[in-house]
Image (spheres, grey):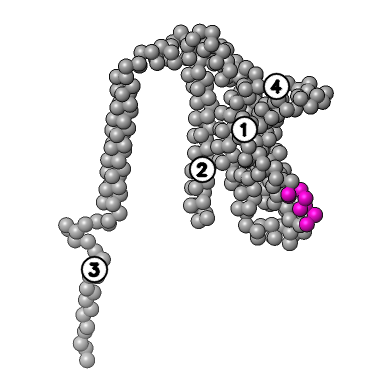
């Protein structure tokens, strides 16, 4: 009756004995880091080898000295900088003025195309024809039509305009058609339930579009908008066909007077100085949106 019972608790298999491996996460992390370092080294070496081969190919070309003298002359850079940079400033002004107008005009056309109802049908048809026509005509032809055709009408309020104005009008006509489609894609990416919810709260269709749909749509299309404006910055050089002394025409004038083409290289460097930072900002915005989508599970 007075028997005692001895209770023994056997160790469970969760403990680690000497010599057993630790958690696999640590070794996987080290292996991943080593793999990343190896990939970085391989990428760096392959990049250096590639550019070394390109430089060697150019340096061994028979006409390399002539090319360097014609396009990369230090004297040419110094002599052409004043006139070419002055012309480039005109390109920058063209871009800024046209960009501001395009943002407003394209947004209005995109909103018109997104409105429903039979009453808005005529405006939607006009907006559709506009976007189809001016996306289909090359910019260079629009510049000729506007710059040479409008003055031929001999209307005082048109004929008295400057070549700068004709250039801005041409850029706005073409790029508004492209940016309209960018805006419209952003508007259509907003789920219809957003609009339905706004209408159920008593907002009108215009109020729902203004306060609910457009803020989300514009935020989503900022990266592609920046890409379009990089193209707009470069296409301002085509306005020189109307006689405006912008950067390309300034470089051409320098080449004609000195028989040296370094002015073209200077113009290209000025464009690169503007477009590359814009491209990197665009990449940063796209990556930021991707991180936000991953964080929210969208």
Disc 1 or 2, which lies upstream in sequence? 1
* Residue matched to label 2: 286
From the viewer's perspective, is the residue at label 3 or at label 2 nearer?
2
Q: Residue at x 31, y 24 (%)?
A: 57
Disc 4 or 1, which lies upstream in sequence? 1
From the viewer's perspective, is the residue at label 1 or at label 3 nearer?
1
Q: Badge 1: few (under 14), some or many (20 or more) residues near its Cα, within 10 Å?
A: many
Residue 13 tag number: 3
Describe the element under mark 3 as helix, strand or loop: loop
Q: Badge 4: few (under 14), some or many (20 or more) residues near its Cα, within 10 Å?
A: some
Q: Is residue 42 in sight in this rendering?
A: yes
Residue 13 position (above or below residue 82): below
Residue 163 tag number: 4
Disc 4 or 2, which lies upstream in sequence? 4
Instruction: Spot the residue most to the right.
Output: 156
Residue 273 position (above or below residue 119): above
- The boundaries of the magenta stretch are 118-125
């Amino acid at each position: 009756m007075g028997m005692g019972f001895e209770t023994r608790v056997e160790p469970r298999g969760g403990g680690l004995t000497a010599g057993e491996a630790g958690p696999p996460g640590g070794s996987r992390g080290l292996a991943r880091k080593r793999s990343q370092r190896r990939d970085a080294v391989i990428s760096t070496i392959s990049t250096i080898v590639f550019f070394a081969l390109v430089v060697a190919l150019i340096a061994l070309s028979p006409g390399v000295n002539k090319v360097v003298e014609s396009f990369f002359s230090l004297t040419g850079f110094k002599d052409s900088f004043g006139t070419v940079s002055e012309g480039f400033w005109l390109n920058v002004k063209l871009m800024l003025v046209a960009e501001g107008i395009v943002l407003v005009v394209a947004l209005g056309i995109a909103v018109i195309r997104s409105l429903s109802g039979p009453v808005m049908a005529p405006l939607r048809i006009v907006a559709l024809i506009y976007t189809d026509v001016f996306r289909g005509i090359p910019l260079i032809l629009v510049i000729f039509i506007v710059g040479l055709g409008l003055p031929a009408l001999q209307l005082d309020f048109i004929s008295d305009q400057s070549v700068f104005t004709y250039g801005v009008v041409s850029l706005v006509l073409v790029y508004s058609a492209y940016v309209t489609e960018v805006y419209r894609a952003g508007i259509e990416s907003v789920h219809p339930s957003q609009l339905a919810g706004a209408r159920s709260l008593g907002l009108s269709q215009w109020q729902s579009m203004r306060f609910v749909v457009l803020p989300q749509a514009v935020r989503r299309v900022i990266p592609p908008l920046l890409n379009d404006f990089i193209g707009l910055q470069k296409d301002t050089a085509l306005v020189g066909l109307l006689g405006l002394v912008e950067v390309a025409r300034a470089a051409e004038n320098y080449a004609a007077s000195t028989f040296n083409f370094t002015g073209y290289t200077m113009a290209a460097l000025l464009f690169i100085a503007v477009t590359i930072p814009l491209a990197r900002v665009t990449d940063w915005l796209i990556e930021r949106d991707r991180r936000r989508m991953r964080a929210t599970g969208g």
